[in-house]
Amino acid sequence: MIRDDALKLIKDNVKGQFLINHMLATEAIMKKVAEKTGEDKDKWGLCGLLHDIDFEETKDNPINHGPKSVEMLEDKGIDKDILHSILAHNFKHTNIMPESKMDWCLLAADAMTGLIIACAMVKEKKLENVTDKTIKKAFKKKGFAAGSNRDNIMTCEKIGISYDDFVHESREAMLEISDVLGL
C-alpha cells in the first residue's frame, strides 16, 4: 500500500480531525526515527499513519484495538511486520509483545505525540514555541498529558536512540508538519 491509498482509507474510516492529526504526527516521528536509524522510512511511516485506523470503532472496547485494524488492513497488501507493530502497540490488550525496532518505535512515538501536542497547547497552540526542554520538563510532570505513557516513550532506548535524541527528533518531525497539524 502506498501513502495516498492509506490516506484515502483513513478518510473513509476516521472522522475526528484530532485522531487524524495524531496519526499524521506518529507517521512523521516514525519516518524521522527510521531515517536516523537507517530503517525503511516509508514502511515505518505507513505503520505510524495506520496504527489507530480502528480507534474510533474500538475506543470503548480496547481489547479489539489493533485486531480490528489488522482485519481492516490484512487484504490491502500491508506487510506482516506492520500488522504486528499495530497489534503490539496495544500489547496490554492484545498480548502481542513488541519485538522489532519498528514495534518499539511505534509504542514510543504513539505516546510522544500526545505529550508534544499538550506542550504546544500551553505554548500559544504553536509547535514552534515548544523546545526540547519544554518537553522534558512536561515529561516529569505526571499529571500533565496523563494519557502519554512515559514508560512507552522510554522504549525509544530499545531501538538505540537516547531519550534526549528521541525528544529532539520527535519535536523536529512534528514541527516539519506543523501547518498540517494546525499547530
Image: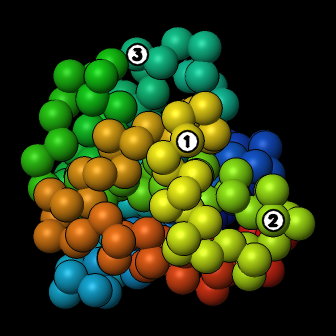
Q: Amino acid at mark 3?
A: Ile
Q: Which residue is under mark 1? A: 141
As rendered, which of 30 and 157 lies closer to the eye? 157
Coloration mode: rainbow
* Circle nearer the N terminus (2, 3): 3
Is residue 137 left or right of 10 when viewed as pictured?
left
Is residue 88 left or right of 114 when viewed as pictured?
left
Q: CA distance from mark 2 to mark 3?
A: 35 Å
As rendered, which of 123 and 156 lies closer to the eye? 123
Q: Which residue is under mark 3? A: 63
Q: Residue at x 81, y 56 (%)?
A: 122
Q: CA distance from mark 1 to mark 3?
A: 29 Å
Q: Is the C terminus in the top left, top right, bottom left or bottom right quadrant?
A: bottom right
> Where residue 109 sits: x, y (%)?
42, 57
Tag 1, which secondary structure? loop
> Where residue 6 sits: x, y (%)?
54, 63
Q: Residue 26: tell me if it is visible.
A: yes
* Circle nearer the N terminus (1, 3): 3
Q: Amino acid at mark 2?
A: Lys
